Amino acid sequence: MTKIAVFDIDGTVYREAMSFIVAEELLAGPDFEKEAQILAAARHTYKSRGSTEAYWVYNKTILDLFKKALKHTTPAQLDEVIANLLKHKSDYCYAYTLQLIKQLKAEGRILVAISGSIADIVEPFARSVGFDYVIASGLEVKDGAFTGERATETKQGKDTILRGLVATRGLTLQDSIGVGDTHRDIPMLAVTAHPIAFNPNAALYEEAEKQGWKIVLERKNMIYELENGSGAYVVKSARPLFDDNHQEHLR
């Protein structure tokens, strides 16, 4: 059976939440001035680290407003916004995970993306960078219009989704690799043989520390690989993405 590698997408391969970029584009229109102000306030609190829960408040705010905007957006309009994102911003990716994807693809692994984001947005991007299977949330459409709700939801139960795919596609979890960035990826990572917590949030870091999982950080032009040794993480390797040590004119 074929070995696999499974990745989250938003914040793991793509540097931002792709749905957020699309939502902000929709909310920038003249019909959503009030909503845009609410979003700007939530974003400011998050960016200024105004509270400990600021990111998740921003997360909920933008998703709620996105749901509202979708009710006034046609499928054709959404397709246009997504196409613009893929044309102009599809390369907003982390170097480490893109390099890893290419390496694993060359090894002959099947690449799986499981995202809590919306399939309309995530699937074309994920396939463009080499994923064989893409599982993401579906938008509900009735009478040719978005209801604002989701027909399918994938941010929870990623382990169940992965096990189901493996069982039905002749794949194996043996020697599998998993990569994610938040606590929502913990169940998925837990069923893989070689989990990697990439730029983890606090909850994922705590679980990685408890389980002894590998942690990888990408900061500026550096990649740091951490491994748990004797109860504490140590830097196993540190390497630059590119050598700028002699590029004084750029410093």
Image: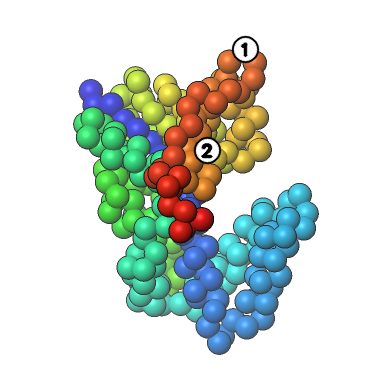
Above or below, 202 against 61 in this view is above
Label 1 sits on a secondary structure element that is loop
Residue 230, numbered circle: 1
Q: Which amino acid does label 1 sit on?
A: Ser
Residue 129, numbered circle: none
Residue 23 position, x and y percent, is 51, 68
Label 2 sits on a secondary structure element that is strand
Mark 1 neighbour density, 10 Å: few (under 14) some (14–19) many (20 or more): few
Above or below, 77 against 2 in this view is below
Left of 32 or right of it: where is 81? Answer: left
Residue 36 position, x and y percent, is 62, 76
> Mark 2 vs mark 1: which is more N-terminal?
2
Residue drawn where x is 70% and y is 66% of the image: 44
Residue drawn where x is 55% and y is 67% of the image: 67
Residue 151 position, x and y percent, is 45, 57
Residue 217, numbered circle: 2
